[in-house]
Amino acid sequence: MDVGLNWDKILMAFAAALALGVSAIATAWVQSRIGASGAGALAEKPELTATIIILLAIPETIVILGFVIAAMILLGG
């Protein structure tokens, strides 16, 4: 009995999930390190608040790029 699996679509969906998942996990790990270090820095110098917020926002670009790559994979372009 032939199920008729379309392996191209399955592999494209897996690649898109992998692109987004790996970038999200990497960003979460990096932000946890930045957050822990930032908390210590803020305890000593509260005037570093803006710098710590900026440093926490920078890794989010990794997830955004992962999302863009996943969208490009799924849309075929």
Image (cartoon, grey):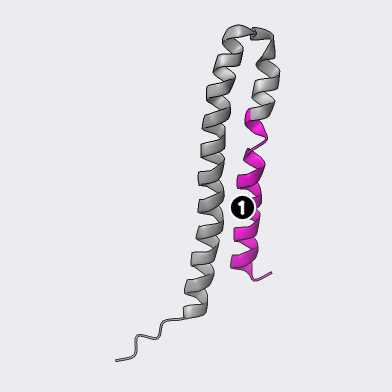
Task: Pinpoint residue 56: horizontal percent, then vertical percent.
Answer: 62, 29
Left or right of 17? Residue 53 is right
Res 74 quadrant in image: bottom right
Give left or right: position of 50 versus 30: right
Q: Which quarter of the image is occupied by the N terminus?
A: bottom left
In the image, residue 60 above or below residue 6: above
Residue 73 is inside the magenta segment: yes
Packing grade of label 1 (10 A; few <14, some 14-19, many >=20) is many
Name the residue located 61 percent from the left edge and 53 percent from the top edge: 67
Position of residue 26 measured from the top left corner of the image (x, y, whole percent): 54, 44
The answer to which quarter of the image holds residue 72 is bottom right
- In the image, residue 36 lies in the stretch drawn in magenta: no
- Where is the C terminus found, in terms of image quarters? bottom right
Residue sitting at x 58%, y 28%: 34
69 over 43 or under it: above or below: below
Boundaries of the magenta span? 56-77
User: Of all residues shown, which one is farthest toward the bottom?
Assistant: 1
| Residue 71 rendering spot, x and y as whole percentages | 62, 60
70, above or below 64, in the image:
below
Q: Residue at x 50, y 52 (%)?
A: 21
- Tell which of 10 and 25 is nearer to you: 25
Q: Position of residue 37 (x, y in %)?
A: 57, 22
Q: Main secondary structure of the magenta part?
A: helix
Left or right of residue 31, residue 55 in this image: right
Residue that numbered label 1 is attached to = 66
Identified at 55% across, 62% down, the residue is: 16
Amino acid type, callout 1: Gly
Give the answer, above or below, for where 67 lies relative to 50. Answer: below
